[in-house]
Image (tube, grey):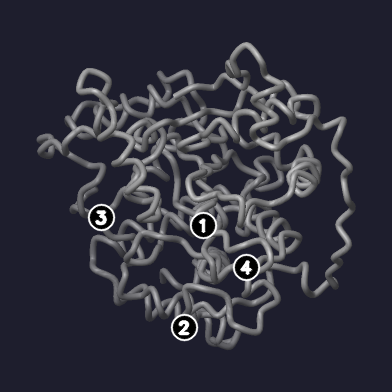
C-alpha cells in the first residue's frame, strides 16, 4: 500500500500524457455545469422506502441509487465509517447524470462527515465510456469543502492504473498537501484487510475477478500476502462471537484497539484509565457491537424497525417496548444497559455535543444491519430515526 502521490512516468512525462490523451490543468477549457436541480431534487434526505434496498422509483435520486455506485459498508478496523465508490457500476456517460451523482455522494457523506470516516474507491471498471469529464472531477474536488476533508482520515484507491496516478499529478496544483497525504494506493484486495474486513464491503464480482487475475500473473515470490485464516476462539473470546450471558465520534489508536480486544478475548483485565487514548473505550464499544455475528437488535426485527416511520407518534413508545421485549434475554439486557448509558451521555450534551440525534447517527448502524451486511441509504435514515426515538423514549420502554 502506497501513499505517494507522485509516480515515475519515465523519461518523457509529456509523451506519457499524450498517450493518455490528457492535457495539463492549465490547458483544459473547463466547461461549466449547466444542469440545475430544484431544492426538492437536492434533498437526498427525503423519506426513503425503507423496505427496499434502493430508493423508491419516484425519488429524485432513484436513477443514481439503483446503480449501487456508492455504498455504506459499516466501520473500518479503527472504528471509522466506510464509504465505498464502485467505478465498475457507473453506466455509460450518456446514461448517468454526473451532477446528480455528485449531489448523491455529498448527501451520503453529509450523514457522516461530523465524525472520522474512510473512503474506498474501486477503480477497476472505469473506461472511456463511463469515466466522467476532467471538468466534473475538478468541480467535484472543489465542491467538497473543509467540512468533508477535515474528518476523512484516508482515501484508498484500489487497483490504481497509470491513468489515475497521472490524473492525480495533473490535479496536484489544486489538491492540498494535507489531503494528498491521505491518498493511498492499494494494489491488491488483501492489503485492504489491514484497514477493513473485505467481506463487509460487498466488493463487485468484476473487481474480485480482476484481483485474482493480478495475483495469478505474479511470480510466486512476488505474491501479495493473503488474508490470515480464521483462528479458533480464545478461551474468553468476546469479539466476533454471539452474545453471552454476563457479558462515539473519533477513531482511536489501532494498536491499542487490537491490544484491548486481545485482552478481553484472553480474559485479561482491561483498565481504560491506564490507556493514553481517551477515545479508546468508545471505539471498543462500537467495535464490539459491529463485530457481533448478528446485530444486537437482531435480523428478526429488521423490517419492523426500518418501517417504524409508519407508526403514529402516540403509539411509538408502546410499539418499541413490544419489539424490545421480543428480543432474546441477553440482547434485551445488553441493549437496556447500553441505552441507559447513552441516555447519561446525552444528558451532558451541552458539553460533549452528543445529543440523542448525534448518538443515533453513531450507534444506529452498529445496532442493526441487513443480513447481507450492507447498509443501504434507504435503511440508514429509518434505523437512525428508530434509534433516536428509542433514546428519547427509553424511560418508557425499559420500565
Q: Quadrant of the N terminus?
A: top left
x then y, percent, for residue 39 = 84, 71
Residue 378 occupies which quadrant of the picture? bottom right
Q: CA distance from mark 4 to mark 3?
A: 31 Å
- Residue with the most extreme top position: 11
Q: Is residue 359 rendered to the left or right of residue 22?
A: left
Precedes in sequence: disc 4 or disc 1:
4
Mark number displayed over residue 318: 2
Which tag is nearer the camera, tag 4 or tag 2?
Answer: 4
Q: Secondary structure at mark 3?
A: loop
Disc 3 and disc 2 in contact, CB within 8 angstroms: no
Residue for point 54% across, 22% down: 3
Answer few, some or many: residues within 10 Å of disc 2's Cα (few below 14, many 20 plus, some between 14 and 19). few
Please say if the residues under marks 2 and 1 sit with CB atoms less than 8 Å apart. no
Q: Position of residue 75 (x, y in %)?
A: 45, 45
Q: Residues within 10 Å of mark 3 (few under 14, many from 20)?
A: some
Checking the image for residue 293, the label placed there is 3
Residue 304 on image: x %, y %: 42, 80
Q: Earlier in the sequence, mark 3 or mark 1?
A: 1
Amino acid at each position: 500500500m502506497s501513499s505517494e502521490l507522485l509516480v515515475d512516468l519515465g523519461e518523457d512525462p509529456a509523451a506519457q500524457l499524450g498517450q493518455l490523451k490528457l492535457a495539463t490543468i492549465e490547458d483544459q477549457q473547463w466547461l461549466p455545469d449547466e444542469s440545475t436541480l430544484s431544492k426538492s431534487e437536492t434533498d437526498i434526505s427525503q423519506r426513503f422506502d425503507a423496505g427496499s434496498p434502493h430508493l423508491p422509483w419516484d425519488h429524485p435520486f432513484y436513477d443514481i441509487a439503483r446503480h449501487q455506485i456508492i455504498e455504506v459498508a459499516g466501520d473500518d478496523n479503527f472504528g471509522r465509517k466506510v464509504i465505498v465508490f464502485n467505478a465498475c457500476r457507473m453506466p455509460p456517460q450518456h446514461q448517468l447524470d454526473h451532477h446528480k451523482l455528485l449531489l448523491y455522494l455529498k448527501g451520503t457523506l453529509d450523514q457522516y462527515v461530523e465524525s472520522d470516516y474512510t473512503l474506498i474507491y474501486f477503480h477497476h471498471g472505469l473506461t472511456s465510456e463511463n469515466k466522467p469529464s476532467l471538468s466534473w472531477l475538478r468541480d467535484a474536488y472543489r465542491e467538497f469543502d473543509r467540512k468533508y476533508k477535515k474528518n476523512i482520515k484516508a482515501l484508498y484507491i484500489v487497483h490504481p492504473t497509470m491513468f489515475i496516478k497521472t490524473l492525480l499529478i495533473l490535479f496536484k496544483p489544486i489538491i492540498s498537501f494535507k489531503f494528498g497525504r491521505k491518498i493511498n494506493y492499494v494494489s491488491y484486495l488483501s492489503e485492504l484487510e489491514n484497514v477493513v474486513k473485505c467481506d463487509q464491503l460487498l466488493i463487485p464480482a468484476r473487481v474480485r475477478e480482476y484481483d485474482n487475475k493480478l495475483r495469478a500473473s505474479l511470480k510466486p515470490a512476488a505474491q501479495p500476502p493473503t488474508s490470515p485464516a480464521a483462528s479458533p476462539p480464545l478461551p474468553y473470546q468476546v469479539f466476533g462471537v454471539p452474545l453471552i450471558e454476563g457479558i462515539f465520534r473519533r477513531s482511536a489508536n489501532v494498536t491499542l484497539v487490537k491490544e484491548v480486544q486481545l485482552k478481553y478475548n484472553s480474559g485479561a483485565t482491561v483498565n481504560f484509565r491506564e490507556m493514553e487514548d481517551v477515545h479508546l473505550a468508545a471505539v471498543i464499544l462500537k467495535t464490539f457491537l459491529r463485530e457481533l455475528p448478528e446485530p444486537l437488535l437482531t435480523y428478526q426485527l429488521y423490517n419492523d424497525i426500518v418501517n417504524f416511520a409508519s407508526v403514529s407518534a402516540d403509539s411509538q413508545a408502546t410499539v418499541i417496548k413490544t419489539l424490545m421485549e421480543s428480543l432474546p434475554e441477553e440482547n434485551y439486557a445488553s441493549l437496556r444497559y447500553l441505552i441507559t448509558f447513552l441516555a447519561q451521555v446525552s444528558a451532558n450534551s451541552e458539553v460533549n455535543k452528543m445529543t440523542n440525534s448525534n448518538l443515533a447517527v453513531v450507534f444506529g448502524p452498529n445496532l442493526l444491519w441487513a443480513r447481507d451486511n450492507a447498509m443501504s441509504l434507504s435503511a440508514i435514515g429509518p434505523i437512525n430515526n428508530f434509534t433516536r426515538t428509542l433514546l428519547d423514549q427509553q424511560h418508557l420502554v425499559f420500565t
